Structure formats: structure tokens, C-alpha cells
Amino acid sequence: MVLPSRRTLVLNAAVAAAALGLDRSLAIAAPEHGRRTSDPSRGFVRTKVGDAECTALYDGIWEKAHDPGFFSNATVAETRQALASAGLPTAFVPIPITVFVIKLNGKVVMCDAGGGDQVQAFNPDSTFVSGRLMAGMRAAGIDPATIETILISHFHPDHIFGLLGKDTNAPVFPNAEIIVPGAEYKFWTDPATVGRLPPGRRSLARRIQAVIPHWKNVLPVDGEDEVVPGIRFVSVPGHTPGHTAFHVSSGSEQLMISNDAAYVPALCGRHPGWHGAFDQDGPLAETSRRKLLDRVIAEKMMICGTHFPWPGLGRIARDGSGYAVTVSTA
Ligand SMILES: [Zn+2]
């Protein structure tokens, strides 16, 4: 598919106002009291992948209370055991959020947008912190206005709410071209999707439908095209219908930005057969996960993921029946 030329965003003010009324509840951040982890002392870490400069930016963490419904085929005890084996806290499930900015071939590309301080924890025993992205970006010397392209992996709140102004739904990156997977766009913007989703997900679909289709700088792309020079979409469906990874290639080095394909690697990497409540289609997510991780190993790529331990970038190897991710230290 040939990308149309860049177009300036024109946000319909009436649509924005309507959206405001629709989903005000989603614009309320979770309180931070009770939080058990602290932000890293520095909110960014840089790595080179060939000539590409990859900057990991800390956006926050979901300290999720244990819940028997988290995995359909793993117990809370097994989940705690898997966290302990990886040296992680076991009192809750630590789900950090990292956003990656890639400078490659003269372009500045942001991969997903974090939660924008707008994601709810849904449970009084859980804490959801997000929206640290912008501070980390400035500390890293990246001016948000210089981001030309934003790639979106899927439309879950911890990946797209950072695009939307809190309380206003105004575009946070009005000059960037936002490239999204075609299948993901089609699913979430279909009016029939609202009624098909579980009740807890319906306000997300309504917020998306009230805003995203009216932004003129959103570009759905089908398949596995090279969406910017050196970065290609890779279809990894299951987590959501259009969930997509980003393959970065520079010289002889490659990086797979796996997004949510391996989710928290201590859980879904070590136990790729575990089916999470967060995966819309568990068996398909597992098939996609195994295929992607096997490719990363076979082609000796580096790997990173949104919910990998900070700073989220490292290597992966087979480990018995699963996979072991080793993340570079911050
Ligand atoms: Zn996620």
C-alpha cells in the first residue's frame, strides 16, 4: 500500500465536545496512594540498533492485584511462582509500560503512546500509573513536536490514551502521522463492536469511535508493509484482532518491538501457553506469540516489549518449553 502524503489534522470541535461528554469517566487517573514501586531515577534509556537510535521512555506501571480470572489456565499460585522465579514482586502483578522512540533514516518515530495518565486500575487493590512519557521524552532531549510518525500496535488504553488530551480528547501530537493496523482500526471503529464487547470494554470503543475516525492524520495500513523506511508492520493477532509488532532493521541488526505479544515475559514468555484475560482470542494470541518469538530467536534479533521489565529491551532464548527474556539493565 502506498502511503498518502502527510495531511494536517483537522479536529472537529463538535465531535471533540461530544466525546468529552461521553467518556469523562475514562479521563480520571487512578490515585497513586498505595503504590508499591517507584519511578526509575531516569525516565529514559538509549540503545543503538545498527544506525537506529532506540530510546526507551518510562510511562508508568500497573500494579495489578492478583485475580483468579487473570489467566484461564493458570492459577494465582502459579502466577506468583512464575513472578518469583523471575525475581519479581509477588504481592501483585507488576505490569510496567514503556514507550519506544526510534530515530532512523532521518525520521523520529514513536511506537505507541502510553496511557496518558488516564487508565483506570478498576480495582481498589490495584494502582495504575501512566503518563510519565512526556517528562521522560523531554529529559531525553526529544521535543514531542519533532515526532513525525506514531505507530500504534493496538487500541488498548495503555497504548493509545497518550494520544488523547485528558478531559478534552484533543490531539496531543497534532502534527504527527498516526499509522495504525487496518484490522485494528476496522474492529474498534465498527459501531457494531460496542455491543459485542464485554461491558467493561464498551466505553473504550465509544471513546475511540467519537474521536479517532475524525482525525485526518490517522492512517490505517493493512498487512505487513514497511510503514516508514526501516520499520515494517508484523501481524500478531489474538491479543486484539489487529495487534501488530514493529520490525526495525538497520545494517545487520534487527529489533522486534513485540508490543503485547509476549505481554509480561515472566508470565507469557516463560509460559507461552497461558491464556490471559487481556488476550481477546487466547489460542490465536498463543499461536502468534510462539511464531513471533521463534522468529526473533532464529534471526538473532533484539527484542523489546511494552510490558517487559524496565527498560524493556533485551534478548530472548528458548528455555525448556518456554522463552526466557534477558533485559539490559537501565
Ligand atoms: Zn498493553
Image (cartoon, rainbow, N blue to C red):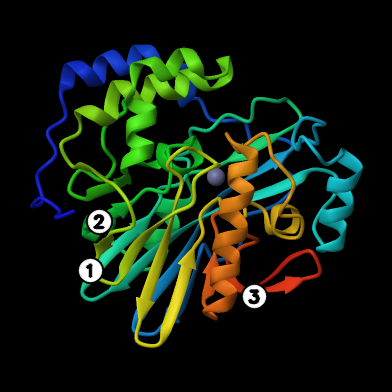
The amino acid pointed to by label 1 is: Lys
The amino acid pointed to by label 2 is: Thr
Corner quadrant of residue 224: bottom left
N-terminal-most mark, 1 or 3: 1
Q: Residues within 10 Å of mark 1 (few under 14, many from 20)?
A: some
- Quarter of the image where ligand 1 sits: top right
Which residue is located at x 79 percent, y 43 percent? 92
Question: Residue 171, percent across and down?
Answer: 26, 37
Secondary structure at badge 1 equals strand
- Contact between marks 1 and 2 (CB within 8 A): the answer is yes
Corner quadrant of residue 262: bottom right
Which residue is located at x 51 percent, y 54 percent? 259
Q: Residues within 10 Å of mark 2 (few under 14, many from 20)?
A: many
Q: Nearer the viewer, mark 1 or mark 3?
A: 1
Residue under label 1, please give it. Answer: 107
Residue under label 2, please give it. Answer: 149
Residue under label 3, please give it. Answer: 329
Question: Residue 132, percent across and down?
Answer: 49, 50
